[in-house]
Amino acid sequence: MALKAAMAVTGAILVLFLIAHMYGNLMIFGGPQTFDTYSAHLRELGEPMLPYEGFLWIMRVVLLASVLVHAYAAVTLWMRARRARPAGQRYHTKKSVQRSYASYTMRWGGVVVVLFVIYHILHLTTNDIAPGGASASPYERVVNGFQIWWVVLSYVIALAAVGFHLRHGIWSAVATLGGNRAGRQRSLNIIATGLSLVVTIGFLIPPFAVLLGLVK
Amino acid sequence: MTELYIEGAPIKDEKAPEGPIEQRWDKRRFSAKLVNPANRRKLSVIIVGTGLAGASAAATLGEAGYQVTSFCYQDSPRRAHSIAAQGGINAAKNYRNDGDSIYRLFYDTVKGGDFRSRESNVYRLAQVSVEIIDQCVAQGVPFAREYGGLLDNRSFGGVQVSRTFYARGQTGQQLLIGAYQALERQIAAGTVRMHTRHEMLELIVVDGRARGVIVRDMVSGEIETHFADAVVLASGGYGNVFFLSTNAMGCNVTATWRAHRKGALFANPCYTQIHPTCIPVSGDYQSKLTLMSESLRNDGRIWVPKEAGDDRDPRQIPEEERDYYLERIYPSFGNLVPRDIASRAAKNVCDEGRGVGPGGLGVYLDFADAIKRMGLPAVEAKYGNLFDMYQRITGENPYEVPMRIYPAVHYTMGGLWVDYDLQSTIPGLFVTGEANFSDHGANRLGASALMQGLADGYFVLPNTINDYLASGPFESLDENTPEAKEAADAVRARIDKLLSVNGNRTVDSFHKELGHIMWDYCGMERSEEGLRKAIERIRELRDEFWQNVKVTGTNEELNQALEKAGRVADFFELAELMCIDALHRRESCGGHFRAESQTEDGEALRHDDEFAYVAAWEFTGTGEQPVLHKENLEYEYVEMKQRSYK
Amino acid sequence: MNITLRVWRQKSRDDEGRMVTYQVEDVSPDMSFLEMLDVLNEKLTLDGHEPVAFDHDCREGICGACGVVINGVAHGPETTTTCQLHMRSFKDGDVIDVEPWRAKAFPVIKDLVVDRGAFDRIIQAGGYISAPTGTAPDAHAMPVPKADADRAFDAATCIGCGACVAACPNASGMLFTAAKVTHLGMLPQGQPERAARVVKMVNQHDEEDFGGCTNIGECAAVCPKGIPLDTISQLNRDLLGSLASGNPK
Ligand SMILES: Cc1cc2nc3c(=O)[nH]c(=O)nc-3n(C[C@H](O)[C@H](O)[C@H](O)COP(=O)(O)OP(=O)(O)OC[C@H]3O[C@@H](n4cnc5c(N)ncnc54)[C@H](O)[C@@H]3O)c2cc1C
Ligand code: HEM
Ligand code: SF4
Ligand code: FES
């Protein structure tokens, strides 16, 4: 049971991160200067109390821990659910009355998201994958990458997955933490949908801006 | 008539104390021997049944420290038939300050039972009623409340005070869940061992004492022997002898009938209650009847067309062509006359050809006036769930078209004879709840079965069974005890017999036919001629059953056909006794109208000079003449009067 | 009307089980679903086959004994119990799949009959108020605000049928557990044991091999008594509160 709470809390941390990250990404519209400064600033944050990149590493550790805890809990619950209705006790016909596409795909969706995150870090953080050319400037890395249509497409697919994951995840986290009350269920679901749309679209604006040549 | 039975020695309740009625229960509790708490662990009690009467007793005796073993045939004790009670439970709390009192509840119950119940028992029931409500509230039973947070009450079928506590239309469920939770708590504490899906098929009597039961594990088919120092039967009523009734499908007489065959007297078997407000039969595939709470009669008006054969849409029938027959015949009580009167009146108008719906077996229960008077939302708030249920079953919308209702068998007042201690004529065999005959006489008032079940289980039995157990523990027994072995062998032989007939009629087809006979001849109206015919036909049908029934499968598996076959076999024997009892009681009393005993204007006529007794029957063999033992009834407090609701 | 049924037949707990097809003729729209199965069983018996075993008792929608998955939906197309489902919800010529509740915690005993003892054990773990007989104060000693009483009542209407488990993609029994936690937790009488109750019941729930809740909502959608999904959130609130205040695990 603590597992569920852990999922909700770590999930929430990840959501907060996503929102901050998205906000950061939108700085791309400020031009190379602003964006690179922001990136550098992230690394200098907390200095001199913290060493260079200290804050970022704390963030990374927290995020990584969150992802690990989150994934561990998810996999454990997943296994439990499989045990609770083992092979040989599956329905021949099963219809869903209520479940949404989002709730249906939480588990595989989550895996897709993690794979994406790895790909994404290799692409824009370490720049080991560098379609369109490597660069020391984060701004240039972004612009180089998103000028290629299939890179954008891969991000679209991944963010759709993130969107669905959040759609059910945000609602579920609130319910798990005891926040769903009589008469509130509808509004909670609307908020969850709204928030995941904001995150998804917010993330997708920069890649498309680059692709369409609005940001060069 | 005597060729059908033999009259034996009279019988008397030796346990009820003398003296002022309000002191008798105190006196008995004082005179009953107590069992030292340390000794209780050494004493064991078997309880068959987990309805209100059984679950409450098991929980309470477990709390007291006895070793309890409990059985039910369902997959969980929470599903006992008590769960289905809708209307409410009476208690003399007088929270309404409307003149109610223990004495009035006592008086109403004796009068309602048409002077065929014992004053001492009924008075005790009324006394204990008050504690039941306290107990249930403490357990978390969510009774209806008012805005001030206090308990709400309503008035119920045939009484003029508001003393009925209720939980929407699910009082039985909420009370049972309370008792069930108390029971589960004791199971967790290890004082009660629960066996679900176990059916009691025989009683073990050793040296004249009830010492155990033979049960069948309904999943594996294993025949098990269980021993104890005392046995309690809380196995409910036998209304299913009529096939169609408001009882759950599994309700049966087997537990009590087997005890009867072992020597326990069966009292007033013909006393059955027919409930006036049930949803009518829609076809011969029908498997059970559904009760609509009697509370509907508080606001609904009952009518039929004045003309026989008028089959217009009820909404097209103008006011002056309708006969609101209850309001017409019984102006002071109107639609709220007691159940038996309402039921028989419905039967009469249908017999006149004025019935409505399929087969002409129904009358209208109309809420059009109530909707006009109270407004739709108020009607919906009060009866919404009942209306929904009606619509689900019939496909008709009762907010627009009047409901159709018809009487159906609902409750059996008869049962094993018990004394004031709830002990049967077999020492160590106690009987509680609907399974005994004790408190309702010839007719039960609405909302008093729940009261009786819980009174017996929470308060009466736990204070009387100790008097018996104090002389235990009795000699320890094992499966090789001849009486136990014999009982187990008899059970196996019967099962083998049922499985080996392999005829060509199903159990249900026999059950349905038996039900028809009982409904036609031993239902609301009985006559000598009809009852004699019924007895003959029951005997023929029983013989055919044993030669031509088809039960598939084996014993060593879950076998629902086999379960049913065993129950129906016992119903056959009971049915015969019911008809004999009905035949010998040449009077109209309570819910039973005897064609030969009526006033000039066709009302029921009781014969107190001849029949003011409990008829307790002794078993002598299948198809043999039973022996009648009479327990005389005396009324010191309530003056015997013919009932009149005019 | 005529109906084709495909029914799960399984001889015993250890048997493999399979879907078997039957025809049922002359079905009346006023029959209940179980009465339609009765008709099938009469026919099977007369043909010398074993009738289909299914649990049922009250046939009024209150005892919670009945329950099968009909065309993939627990209790079938109407939000009610199987016994209160009528054939007028189907049409002539329909093919209807009938399966038992499927969950590890509810092993099949035979055909459509499952063992729901796990629910009783969850109640044993703490689904009660300890009020031994005879210890109760007067019923009016403790008024209960109507709103709380109503909320408790709504939760108390659960009939323990198990449809929530059958419908849940995780085979979780959380709606059932939450209904009891909420029923008792809303009442003043239930307060002393409230914090411990929820922990004990949830632990037992997990031990019985039910899956965990992921807030999908299939349970509430099929619940014949309309126990709402927010009941589970109420349980979560109680549980987190209880764990946070250091209550026993
Ligand atoms: C539809 C309906 C509505 C009602 N409404 C009201 C009402 O509003 N107010 C009121 O006061 N009364 C009402 N009654 C009557 C009341 O519900 C019952 O009389 C009462 O609940 C009986 O309780 P009980 O404990 O004696 O038996 P039951 O609840 O019938 O329990 C019988 C128990 O015995 C077990 N059992 C039976 N045979 C065997 C066997 N052979 N082996 C093992 N176990 C066995 C069963 O498993 C069950 O656990 C109503 C009855 C019906 C049918
Ligand atoms: C291994 C990868 C992942 C898997 C298997 C996974 C799986 C899950 C599952 C099963 C849930 C529970 C859903 C429910 O309660 O219905 C969930 C919730 C959630 N996930 Fe993930 N996820 C993964 C990665 C991520 C990532 C990378 C993020 C952030 C970008 C994320 C954000 C969330 C959020 C916010 C929740 C809501 C918390 C909750 O449900 O209680 N997840 N995830
Ligand atoms: S919560 Fe609903 S579906 Fe689940 S057991 Fe209770 S009544 Fe049945
Ligand atoms: S048979 Fe009782 S709820 Fe369906």
Image (spheres, coloured by chain):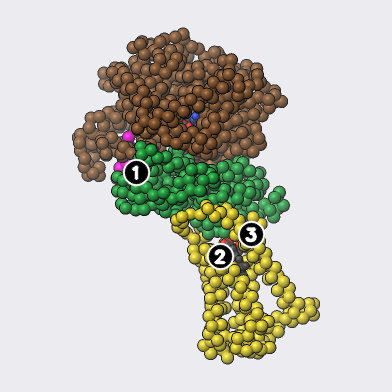
Chain colours: A yellow, B brown, C green
Q: Chain of mark 3?
A: A
Q: Nearer the viewer, residue A127 or B541?
A: B541
Q: Quadrant of residue B196?
A: top right
Mark 2 lies on residue: A106
Check disc 1 and report its element: helix, strand or loop: loop
Mark 1 lies on residue: C31
Q: Nearer the viewer, residue A134 or B185?
A: A134
Q: Residue at x 60, y 60 (%)?
A: A78
What span is colored magenta in the figure? B402-406
Cα distance in 3D space between marks 2 and 3: 14 Å
Q: Residue at x 38, y 21 (%)?
A: B576
Whether residue B254 can be seen here: yes
In magenta segment, residue B404: yes
Mark 3 lies on residue: A76
Q: Are the residues at dot 1 and dot 2 in contact (C-beta closer than 8 Å)? A: no
The three-letter amino acid code for the residue at tag 1 is Met
* Residue labelled 1 has its Cβ within 8 Å of some atom of ligand 4: no
Q: Residue at x 54, y 32 (%)?
A: B222
Check disc 3 and report its element: helix, strand or loop: helix
Nearest to the eye among marks 3 and 1: give it. 3
Toward the top, the furthest residue is: B9
The three-letter amino acid code for the residue at tag 2 is Met
Q: Residues within 10 Å of mark 1 (few under 14, many from 20)?
A: many
Cα distance in 3D space between marks 1 and 2: 41 Å
Q: Nearer the viewer, residue B317 or B511?
A: B511
